[in-house]
C-alpha cells in the first residue's frame, strides 16, 4: 500500500516586490512521515510553509489537503483545517504561565469569568500529549528554551491537527534538548501526523527525516530519500554546484596561526562576575582565531558580554594593545577596536524597518558620531562589497531588512560589524540559521581577515566549526575555563572530553 498523501502543493507561485520567492514549486507530504525542507537562505522554505499555514496568500498553483482543494488564507483558517505551524520566531509571552500561554486567545469561561481550573487542566492535557508531565502553573520564563519550544508546539497542535510544520525549531536547543524534541516528533508521527521540518543542521535532518525536499532559488530541485542521497550530494543540490566543489568548500580552512612570540592584542585578567563567570584570564593575539567551546549555559555568551563591557566585571581588567581600558563599557570597547556580533539577532541586532544599507552602516555611523555623516558613495561602496562577499539575497540595498529571509538577516548583522574593521571581532554563534554554503563562505572570509591581522573570538555550538577554524580553543564548563587546546591538540574528541568531564557520573 502506498502511504496516503496528506498535503499536495502543486505549481505554487509567490512573488514579492522584486523577488519571485516561489516559482512553480511542488511539495507532497504523506501521513505519518517527517519531511525535511532544505535549501539555502532565501530559497523559499519559510514562504512555502507560510502559504500552507495561511500566513501568505499565493499567486498561483493549488493546495490539496487529503484530496480536497483548500485555500487557507488566514492562519486561523489553516488551523481549523488541521494545519498547525510553529514559525521561526516563536511568539509566546514569557511572563504568563505555561497554561495561560497554551490557552491564549481561547480562555474557557464560566459564568463570564476566566475558568482557571480548566485552563490548568487543559494545559496539562496538552503537554501530556507530547509526553511531558509538568507543572503548567510555572511562568514560561522559568522553563528551558526546549520546554518553551514544546509549549509552542502544544499550543499549535489542535486536537484535530493532521499537519505540523516546524520552521527551524532546533536553532537554539542543545543536543539533549534536540533529542527531547525529536522524541515528541516521533510520537506525533506515530499518531499519523505529517510533519514538515526545516533546519540547517544536516546531522539532524539525516537523523529524523523520512523524506527530503530541496528548493533552490524558489524552484523545486527534487524529492529524495535520505538513505539514497549522501550528504555531499545533498549539499551540492542545495547550492547548485557539483560534488567536487562542495568537498573543497567543506575542507579545513583555518589559516596559519600567528607567531607564538607575537604580543597579545587583548589580554584579560580575572574577568568575571558572580553567578555568571568565574574569573577568567584570556589572551588573544592579532591574527589569531580563538574558539570558545562549551555547552549551552557554560559561560560562553557571558564571556563575550563581559569582554565587550555590556556586563560589568567584578574587578579584573581588560587590556587592548597594551593599554588598560579605563571605564569598561561598550563605547570604550568600540573605540579601542572591539566589536561584538551578538547571538540573538532579533533582540540585540536587527532593526526590521530600516533598509539593508541602513542596518549595515549603523554601527559605523554611530562610531563616527551622527554629525559626521558617512558620504553616500562611501556607504554604497561598503554595502555593495558586503552584499557580494556574504552573498546576501536581496534585490537591492534599500529593501527593509525585515523582509529578508532569516539567514540573510543574520548576514546583514555580520556585515555591520565587519564594516567597522575591528581589531578584535567577537562572534557569538555567527552561523546559526545560516545555510551550509554561506557558512563555508563566512568561514573563509574570517580566515582571510585574520590573515590580514584581525583577531577573532569565535563562539559556536557546532564543534566541527570550532575545530576547523580555530588556532586555539578555550573550553568552558559550568561557567569556568577548564582547558585550552592549541594546534594539533584541537580535535573533536579532545574538546568533548573537556566539555564532558565529570558529567558522566552526574548525568544519566
Ligand atoms: N514578507 C516579505 N516581503 C518581501 N520579500 C519577502 C518576504 N518574505 C520573504 N521574502 C523574500 O522571499 C525569498 C524567500 O524567503 P524565505 O524566507 O522563504 O527563505 P528561506 O528559505 O526560509 O530562508 P532562511 O533559510 O534564511 O530562513 C527571499 O528572497 C526573501 O527576501
Ligand atoms: Mg526561513
Image (cartoon, rainbow, N blue to C red):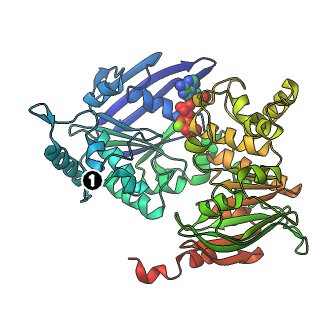
Residue 117: percent from the left, percent from the top? Answer: 14, 47
Which residue lies under the disc numbered 1?
130
User: Do we see residue 243 in this rendering?
Assistant: no
User: Do we see residue 225 in this rendering?
Assistant: yes
User: In this image, 111 relative to 326: left or right?
Assistant: left
User: In this image, 460 relative to 132: left or right?
Assistant: right
Q: Quadrant of the N terminus?
A: top left
In which quarter of the view is residue 208 placed?
A: bottom left
Q: Quadrant of the C terminus?
A: bottom left
User: In this image, 288 relative to 138: left or right?
Assistant: right
Q: Nearer the viewer, residue 420 or 86?
A: 420
In which quarter of the view is residue 42 placed?
A: top right
**Residue at (87%, 63%) from the top-left corner?**
321
Q: Quadrant of ligand 1?
A: top right
Residue 257: percent from the left, percent from the top? Answer: 84, 67
Residue 333: percent from the left, percent from the top? Answer: 77, 54
Residue 87: percent from the left, percent from the top? Answer: 43, 38
**Residue at (72%, 26%) from the top-left corner?**
397
User: In this image, 74 relative to 424: left or right?
Assistant: left
In which quarter of the view is residue 270 placed?
A: bottom right
Q: Within 10 angstroms of label 1, few (less than 14), some, or many (20 or more) residues?
A: many
**Residue at (57%, 53%) from the top-left corner?**
231
Vertical placement of residue 351 versus 478, above or below: above
Amino acid at each position: 500500500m502506498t502511504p496516503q498523501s496528506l498535503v499536495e502543493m502543486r505549481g505554487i507561485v509567490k512573488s514579492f516586490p522584486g523577488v519571485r520567492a516561489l516559482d512553480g514549486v511542488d511539495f507532497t507530504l504523506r501521513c505519518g512521515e517527517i519531511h525535511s525542507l532544505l535549501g539555502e537562505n532565501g530559497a523559499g522554505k519559510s514562504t512555502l510553509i507560510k502559504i500552507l499555514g495561511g500566513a501568505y496568500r499565493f499567486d498561483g498553483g493549488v493546495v490539496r489537503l487529503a484530496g480536497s482543494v483548500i485555500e487557507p488564507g488566514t492562519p486561523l483558517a489553516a488551523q481549523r483545517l488541521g494545519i498547525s505551524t510553529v514559525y521561526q520566531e516563536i511568539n509566546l509571552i514569557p511572563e504568563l504561565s505555561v497554561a495561560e500561554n497554551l490557552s491564549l486567545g481561547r480562555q474557557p469561561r464560566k459564568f463570564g469569568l476566566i475558568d482557571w481550573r480548566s485552563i490548568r487542566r487543559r494545559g496539562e492535557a496538552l503537554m501530556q500529549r507530547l509526553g511531558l508531565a509538568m507543572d503548567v502553573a510555572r511562568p514560561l520564563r522559568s522553563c528551558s528554551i526546549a520546554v518553551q519550544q514544546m509549549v509552542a508546539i502544544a499550543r499549535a497542535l489542535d486536537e484535530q491537527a493532521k499537519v505540523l510544520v516546524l520552521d527551524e525549531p532546533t536553532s537554539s536547543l542543545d543536543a539533549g534538548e534536540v533529542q527531547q524534541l525529536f522524541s515528541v516528533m516521533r510520537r506525533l508521527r506515530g499518531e499519523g501526523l505529517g510533519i514538515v521540518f526545516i533546519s540547517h543542521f544536516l546531522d539532524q535532518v539525516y537523523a529524523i527525516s523520512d523524506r527530503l525536499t530541496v528548493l533552490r532559488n524558489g524552484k523545486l530541485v527534487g524529492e529524495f530519500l535520505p538513505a539514497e542521497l549522501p550528504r555531499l550530494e545533498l549539499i551540492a543540490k542545495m547550492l547548485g554546484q557539483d560534488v567536487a566543489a562542495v568537498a573543497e568548500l567543506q575542507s579545513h580552512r583555518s589559516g596559519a596561526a600567528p607567531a607564538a612570540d607575537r604580543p597579545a592584542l587583548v589580554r584579560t585578567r580575572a574577568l568575571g562576575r558572580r553567578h555568571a563567570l568565574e574569573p577568567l584570564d584570556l589572551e588573544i593575539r592579532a591574527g589569531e582565531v580563538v574558539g570558545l567551546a562549551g555547552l549551552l549555559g557554560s559561560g560562553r555568551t557571558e564571556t563575550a558580554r563581559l569582554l565587550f563591557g555590556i556586563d560589568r566585571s567584578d574587578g579584573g581588567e581588560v587590556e587592548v594593545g597594551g593599554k588598560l581600558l579605563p571605564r569598561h563599557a561598550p563605547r570604550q570597547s568600540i573605540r579601542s577596536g572591539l566589536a561584538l556580533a551578538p547571538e540573538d539577532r532579533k533582540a540585540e541586532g536587527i532593526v526590521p524597518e530600516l533598509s539593508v544599507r541602513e542596518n549595515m552602516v549603523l554601527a559605523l555611523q554611530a562610531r563616527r558620531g551622527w554629525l559626521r555623516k558617512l558620504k553616500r558613495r562611501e556607504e554604497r561602496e561598503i554595502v555593495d562589497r558586503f552584499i557580494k562577499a556574504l552573498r546576501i539575497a536581496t534585490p537591492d540595498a534599500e529593501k527593509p531588512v525585515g523582509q529578508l529571509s532569516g539567514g540573510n538577516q543574520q548576514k546583514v548583522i555580520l556585515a555591520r560589524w565587519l564594516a567597522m574593521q575591528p581589531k578584535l571581532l567577537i562572534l557569538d554563534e555567527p552561523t546559526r540559521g545560516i545555510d551550509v554554503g554561506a557558512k563555508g563562505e563566512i568561514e573563509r572570509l574570517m580566515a582571510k581577515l585574520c590573515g590580514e591581522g584581525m583577531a577573532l573570538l569565535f563562539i559556536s555550538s557546532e564543534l566541527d566549526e570550532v575545530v576547523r577554524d580555530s588556532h586555539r580553543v578555550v573550553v568552558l564548563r559550568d561557567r569556568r575555563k577548564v582547558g585550552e587546546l592549541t594546534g594539533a591538540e584541537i580535535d573533536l574528541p579532545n574538546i568533548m572530553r573537556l566539555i564532558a568531564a565529570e558529567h558522566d557520573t552526574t548525568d544519566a
